[in-house]
Image (spheres, rainbow, N blue to C red):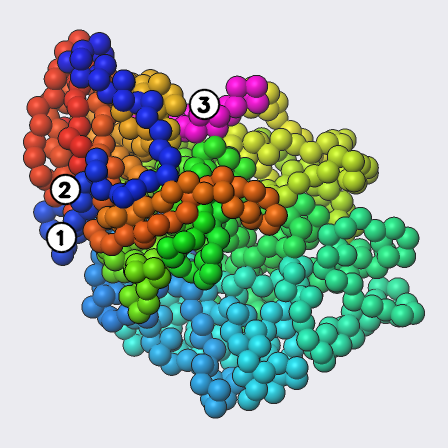
């Protein structure tokens, strides 16, 4: 077979098909039907050996010499492929099976997001949820046995405060913001953390404090005084906060100014003048320092308990990502590790849309590859601190989820992001039936929307994890180095670059740091070129920016990494990787003419949308490797999924999208893979197609000639090994 044979021409002719509204989902697809033991005995795609025999066998995870990364106890770089997991609330048998499955598909870090506060209103405030604690202990033991580290998130202020806790103004009301200043709640929090980290784990014989399998301690999940929720702090708790502010002002100025008030967070997101500007700056500094002190004091408590783990303060965001993010991140710098939660979603509107997908819901179904500003890896990392994305996913009901692991693996490697946790593993292996069975809407069951245990996401882990963890893509140097004086944070001056939000050149004119030589916002595509890093308490005059014109080509809707290994065409929606041991693409190959040329590969596809990886399994470049994993991912839905075109309004803006007619039912069905390749590696002689459990299904002969091997894939190919 050659590039001009009829097979390749037929594939090319079909490549211009595009997806509109879909349904009923079924024709041109194949059934995803795993067995009872995916990636178990007999699998040719079991990545368990990439993990340590036991997590923490060489000691505690610690900081690298420059503080920017995490290393294992033996000093080796820690490259974590991570998921959040709900299995700690399931049986021990399920936990064991889950941990083994995750290790097989490349995972070496999980996040347990728990709530250890007592649920029984009659229980003492400083007691702990014993069932939750036992689940944490048991899940940690299962993960440790499979060489998987743990990040532990113990509490979320989403917890409703019962009347029995005697927090005035709060009766079955969520306690947003209170833990930063309420002494009774802080005392209870200390008791919970003492129980969590001091008690012996009956499944390991160690307390969590002395167990190196616990890599990162999170203090809390998703809370901030700089977020909108602080505006809802109820009396008399808001008076307690105000008195703390008055004491802070007295210490700063020697007296309390007259008529002190606490501004709404909304006021901190706006430019202010006169005395109000001074008050806004003081309140921003006060909130940030109050959070900083809480995080610092809680780490001191953990150290007294004997904890040696790295500590992360929080993973939330402020109300305004332009004016307030740096103040928020500075407050987190009290601890070693930075973190954020950030998801990739399309519009999804309808009753209960926060947790489920119903018939009649309105959606837009858009790939993130067309909107690179939405990539969750676009992060301004803080110098001297590792950075984690502790919750994220390409959230259902998006059709274009298969791009997620490809994009994350590539840009995580490029920027040196330390871990990205897919949210959330809901089943021991696969979530084969996401339906919510206790109710129906128009005859169909709703779907749970937050599982990553589905073929389009977790099914794409092996190749992405293998390439990332083996370091097949190079980390780039700094594209942006920003230094920020702390006063610029309190004054809420405009940073050189922000991860989200919009800089208004009219309203925000003159709002950049006076000491900075750079007086304009930097193109946010800089996040896709290399490392973007900030130093707090530095000299703004020392900020610097690389020549981004070499990498960002707005006129062509393209951006290339500084390493030259990643190229994103966000006009056509296709991302390509061109490294010696990893080459492939994700996105709308049809928009690219059906043909993708890479250094050692030519790929031709009749799919409109596809993810495709060629990853060396022996560490050698693809052109000389003796064992290569080929992995593909296409659009998948439940059988019978159906939508129709629809126009609707979201926040007053009219949208062209789709209306869900049927949510479908099991099994998952995956669009046929229509792909041929030609690879410059004459050392290969056969192709072994694997089933979705990673076991050999059939052997195919490669066409060999002129120093290349060529093959057309069967339509139900997800994994294939070239040897």
Marks 2 & 1, CB-CB < 8 Å contact: yes
Residue at x 30%, y 22% (from the top left corner): 15
| Above/below status of 577 relative to 220 | above
Q: Nearer the viewer, residue 406 or 361?
A: 361
Let me know if residue 56 appears in the view.
Answer: no
Cα separation, mark 2 vs mark 1, equals 10 Å
Marks 3 & 1, CB-CB < 8 Å contact: no
| Above/below status of 163 relative to 661 | below
Residue at x 66%, y 84% (from the top left corner): 168
Disc on res. 35: 1
Tell me: 246 left or right of 274: left
Circle 3 packing at 10 Å, graded few (<14), some (14-19), many (20+), is some
Tell me: 78 left or right of 202: right
- Asked if the magenta segment contains residue 655, the reply would be no
Position in image of residue 604 (x %, y %):
27, 21
Q: Quadrant of residue 301?
A: bottom right
The residue segment tinted magenta is 553-582
| Number of marks in picture | 3
Q: Mark 3 points at which residue?
A: 564
| Above/below status of 37 relative to 457 | below
Q: Name the residue under label 2.
A: 691
Position in image of residue 411 (x %, y %):
45, 36
Give the foreground label among 2 and 3: 2
Marks 2 & 3, CB-CB < 8 Å contact: no
Circle 1 packing at 10 Å, graded few (<14), some (14-19), many (20+), is few
Residue at x 48%, y 25% (from the top left corner): 571
- Mark 3 vs 1, N-terminal side: 1
Cα separation, mark 3 vs mark 1, equals 41 Å
Q: Which of 360 and 123 is in front in this view?
A: 360
């Amino acid at each position: 077979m050659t590039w001009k044979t009829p097979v390749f021409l037929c594939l090319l002719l079909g490549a211009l098909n595009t997806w509109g509204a879909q349904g009923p989902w079924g024709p041109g697809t194949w059934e995803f039907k795993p067995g009872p033991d995916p990636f178990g005995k007999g699998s040719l795609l079991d990545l368990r050996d990439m993990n340590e025999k036991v997590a923490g066998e060489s000691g505690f995870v610690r900081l690298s010499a420059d503080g920017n990364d995490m290393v294992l106890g033996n000093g080796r770089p820690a490259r974590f492929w991570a998921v959040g997991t709900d299995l700690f609330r399931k049986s021990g048998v399920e936990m064991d099976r889950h941990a083994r499955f995750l290790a097989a598909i490349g995972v070496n870090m999980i996040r347990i997001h728990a709530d250890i506060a007592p649920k029984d209103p009659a229980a003492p405030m400083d007691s702990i949820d014993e069932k939750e604690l036992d689940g944490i202990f048991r899940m940690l033991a299962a993960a440790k046995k499979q060489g998987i580290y743990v990040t532990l998130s113990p509490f979320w202020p989403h917890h409703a405060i019962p009347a029995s806790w005697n927090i005035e103004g709060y009766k079955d009301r969520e306690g947003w913001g209170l833990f930063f200043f309420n002494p009774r709640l802080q005392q209870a929090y200390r008791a919970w953390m003492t129980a969590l980290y001091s008690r012996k784990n009956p499944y390991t014989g160690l307390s969590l404090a002395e167990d190196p399998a616990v890599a990162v301690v999170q203090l809390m999940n998703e809370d901030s005084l700089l977020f909108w929720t602080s505006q809802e702090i109820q009396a008399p708790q808001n008076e307690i906060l105000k008195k703390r502010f008055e004491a802070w002002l007295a210490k700063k100025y020697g007296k309390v100014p007259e008529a002190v008030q606490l501004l709404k967070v909304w006021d901190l997101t706006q430019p202010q003048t006169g005395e109000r500007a001074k008050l806004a700056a003081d309140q921003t500094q006060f909130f940030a320092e109050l959070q900083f002190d809480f995080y610092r004091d809680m780490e001191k408590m953990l150290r007294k308990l004997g904890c040696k783990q790295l500590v992360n303060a929080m993973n939330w965001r402020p109300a305004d990502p332009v004016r307030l993010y740096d103040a928020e991140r500075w407050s987190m710098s009290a601890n070693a590790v930075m973190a954020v939660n950030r998801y990739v979603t399309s519009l999804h509107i309808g009753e209960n849309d926060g947790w489920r997908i119903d018939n009649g819901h309105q959606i837009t179904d858009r790939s993130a590859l067309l909107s690179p500003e939405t990539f969750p890896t676009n992060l301004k990392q803080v110098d001297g601190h590792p950075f984690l994305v502790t919750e994220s996913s390409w959230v259902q009901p998006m059709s274009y989820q298969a791009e997620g692991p490809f994009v994350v693996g590539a840009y995580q490697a490029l920027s040196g992001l330390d871990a990205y946790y897919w949210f959330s593993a809901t089943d021991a292996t696969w979530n084969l039936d996401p339906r919510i069975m206790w109710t129906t809407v128009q005859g169909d069951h709703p779907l749970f929307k937050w599982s990553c245990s589905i073929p389009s996401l977790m099914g794409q882990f092996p190749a992405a994890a293998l390439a990332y963890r083996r370091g097949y893509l190079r980390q780039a140097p700094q594209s942006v180095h920003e230094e920020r004086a702390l006063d610029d944070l309190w004054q809420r001056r405009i940073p050189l670059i922000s991860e989200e939000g919009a800089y208004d050149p009219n309203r925000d004119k003159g709002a950049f740091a006076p000491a900075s030589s750079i007086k304009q916002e930097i193109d946010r595509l800089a996040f896709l070129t290399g490392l973007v890093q900030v130093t707090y308490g530095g000299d703004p005059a020392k900020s610097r920016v690389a020549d981004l014109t070499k990498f960002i080509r707005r006129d062509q809707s393209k951006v290339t990494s500084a390493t030259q290994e990643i190229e994103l065409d966000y006009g056509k929606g296709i991302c390509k990787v061109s490294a010696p041991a990893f080459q492939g693409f994700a996105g709308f190959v049809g928009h690219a003419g059906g043909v993708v040329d890479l250094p050692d590969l030519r790929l031709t596809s009749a799919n409109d949308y596809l993810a495709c990886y060629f990853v060396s399994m022996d560490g050698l470049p693809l052109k000389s490797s003796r064992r290569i994993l080929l992995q593909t991912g296409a659009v998948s839905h439940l059988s019978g999924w159906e939508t129709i075109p629809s126009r609707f309004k979201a926040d007053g803006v009219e949208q062209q999208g789709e209306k869900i007619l049927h949510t479908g039912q099991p099994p998952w069905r995956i669009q046929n893979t229509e792909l041929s390749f030609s690879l410059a590696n004459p050392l290969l002689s056969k192709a072994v197609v694997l089933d979705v459990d990673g076991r050999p299904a059939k052997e195919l002969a490669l066409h060999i000639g002129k120093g290349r091997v060529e093959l057309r894939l069967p339509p139900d190919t997800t994994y294939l090994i070239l040897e």
